[in-house]
């Protein structure tokens, strides 16, 4: 087996440390090395040391010249809705003109527009549409991407979405993590009659979850817990059934109004609670005392034109494990640009650069139960790497909106150039 040495980086930012979510002062040191090289063998990182030492230890190794760029762990995007059909670009302007989501829904937009559109498409079509989108995420530095279903909202259309994710993971070197989100919304046809809600939730529990598990189509189940979508009790019922069936749990929680979603996530032992722009003080305390990762999605609040962001400082200072993700989706966050999320983390959430990077690597991995596998440049971890055209890590959030990612590798295999 031939080793590959990554040499000549101006900085290797290792994020190395315990294979679990980092909290508090653990987030202050991203592990910046200025004279280090990285040895990769068989898809795994085998050593981090000076180039001369690694050349002695691995004679005949191939070399990747990092050309004075910054080498980081590949970014871990732990929250996306990358399986969808058409874009919804027209809604952005409607919002700017003062229309709210109800107005937009009446004009044929909103999540139900994505649902109608996805139902009309074949699995092949969904795969073809998602391929360039996922490549785009990789081109900005992501090497692990969680992808949710949730625009189907029927048994067949949810399974179709998850099968598309399964096929995409064979077509791309990216590590994809599938999540079943049949509880993204109550479909319109179920809202049209009184017992529709309960019938749809029962369909999720009795048919969708068993078939998702039987087909090995998802690692996580997620629900959208919030006013107008699922109540706390409904969320608990769906997630409890999912957990009993062997799925791990995620929640969309407390996005625009505090509804006890974070507290529910902690009580159920969910792997992550996501959004949290309106989390209560009680919710912050509940997450801080739990293993549940608080995943923040600042791009969504920016794109929706909201004048608030999740209380990231209070979460971190209170002891919660914070991760960052793009929330890549057609309605509320159509960006593949993860470094832009780091910009928002620093400029709007008041994180340090080191906190932001660890939230996008180690803690993103923890939000997918993968902190033992990816998210750090350390011996034994998967060789998931991103190389940026900058000389100092602090330039990563600084050149905002600019694509500085030159290349990514997943399990040592080049992913995007
Ligand atoms: Zn989401």
Image (cartoon, rainbow, N blue to C red):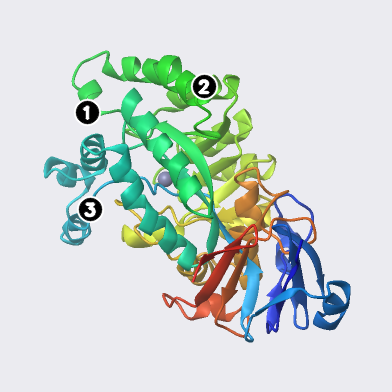
Residue where numbered disc 2 is placed: 214
Q: Position of residue 373 (x, y in %)?
A: 70, 50
Of badges 1 and 3, the one in the foreground is 3
Q: Is residue 102 visible?
A: yes
| Contact, mark 1 vs mark 2 (Cβ under 8 Å) | no
* Res 90 → quadrant: bottom left
- Residue at the image point whose x is 31% and y is 61% from the top: 305
Q: Is residue 5 left or right of residue 250?
A: right
Secondary structure type for disc 2 = helix
Crowd tier of the residue under label 2, counting other residues whose Cα lies within 10 Å: few below 14, some 14–19, many 20 or above? few
Q: Is residue 278 left or right of residue 143?
A: left
Secondary structure type for disc 1 = helix
Q: Position of residue 347 (x, y in %)?
A: 50, 72
**336 in relation to 115, above or below:** below
Which of the numbered marks, if any, corresponds to residue 5? Answer: none
| Contact, mark 1 vs mark 3 (Cβ under 8 Å) | no
Q: Is mark 2 within 8 Å of ligand 1?
A: no
Q: Position of residue 284 (x, y in %)?
A: 59, 45
Q: Is residue 293 left or right of residue 302?
A: right
Q: Nearer the viewer, residue 191 or 143?
A: 143
Residue where numbered disc 1 is placed: 188
Q: Is residue 308 visible?
A: no
**393 in relation to 325, above or below:** below
Disc nearer the start of the sequence (1/2): 1
Disc nearer the start of the sequence (3/2): 3
Q: CA distance from mark 1 to mark 2?
A: 27 Å
Residue where numbered disc 3 is placed: 88
Q: Position of residue 295 (x, y in %)?
A: 54, 50
Q: Is residue 192 left or right of residue 180?
A: left
Q: CA distance from mark 1 to mark 3?
A: 18 Å
């Amino acid at each position: 087996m031939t080793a590959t040495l990554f040499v000549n980086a101006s900085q290797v930012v290792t994020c190395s440390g315990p294979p679990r979510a980092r909290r508090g002062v653990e987030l202050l040191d991203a592990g910046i090395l200025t004279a280090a090289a990285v040895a990769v063998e068989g898809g795994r990182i085998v050593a981090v040391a000076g180039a001369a030492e690694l050349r002695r230890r691995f004679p005949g190794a191939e070399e990747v010249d990092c050309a004075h760029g910054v080498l980081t762990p590949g970014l871990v995007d732990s929250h996306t809705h990358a399986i969808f059909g058409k874009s919804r670009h027209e809604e952005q302007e409607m919002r700017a003109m003062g229309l709210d989501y109800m107005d937009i829904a009446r004009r044929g937009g909103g999540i139900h527009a994505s649902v109608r559109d996805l139902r009309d498409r074949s699995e092949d079509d969904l795969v073809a549409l998602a391929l360039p989108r996922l490549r785009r995420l990789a081109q900005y530095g992501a090497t692990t991407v969680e992808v949710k279903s949730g625009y189907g909202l029927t048994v067949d259309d949810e399974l179709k979405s998850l099968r598309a994710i399964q096929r995409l993971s064979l077509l791309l070197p990216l590590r994809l993590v599938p999540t079943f989100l049949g509880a993204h919304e109550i479909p319109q046809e179920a809202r049209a009659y009184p017992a529709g809600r309960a019938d749809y939730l029962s369909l999720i529990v009795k048919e969708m979850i068993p078939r998702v598990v039987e087909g090995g189509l998802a690692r996580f189940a997620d629900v959208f817990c919030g006013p107008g979508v699922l109540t706390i009790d409904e969320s608990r019922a769906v997630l409890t059934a999912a957990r009993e069936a062997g799925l791990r749990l995620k929640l969309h929680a407390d996005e625009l109004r505090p509804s006890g979603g974070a507290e529910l996530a902690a009580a159920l032992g969910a792997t992550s609670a996501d959004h949290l722009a309106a989390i209560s003080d009680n919710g912050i305390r509940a997450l801080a005392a739990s293993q549940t990762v608080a995943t923040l999605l600042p791009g969504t609040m920016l794109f929706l034109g909201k004048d608030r962001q999740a209380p990231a400082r209070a979460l971190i200072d209170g002891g919660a494990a914070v991760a960052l993700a793009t929330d890549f989706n057609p309605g509320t966050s159509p960006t593949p640009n993860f470094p832009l999320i780091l910009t928002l983390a620093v400029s709007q959430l008041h994180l340090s650069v080191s906190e932001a990077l660890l939230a996008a690597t180690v803690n993103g991995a923890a939000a997918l139960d993968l902190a033992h596998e990816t998210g750090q440049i350390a011996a034994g971890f998967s060789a998931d790497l991103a190389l940026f055209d900058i000389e100092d890590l602090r330039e990563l959030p600084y050149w905002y909106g600019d694509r500085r990612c030159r290349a990514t590798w997943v399990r040592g295999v080049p992913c995007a150039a």
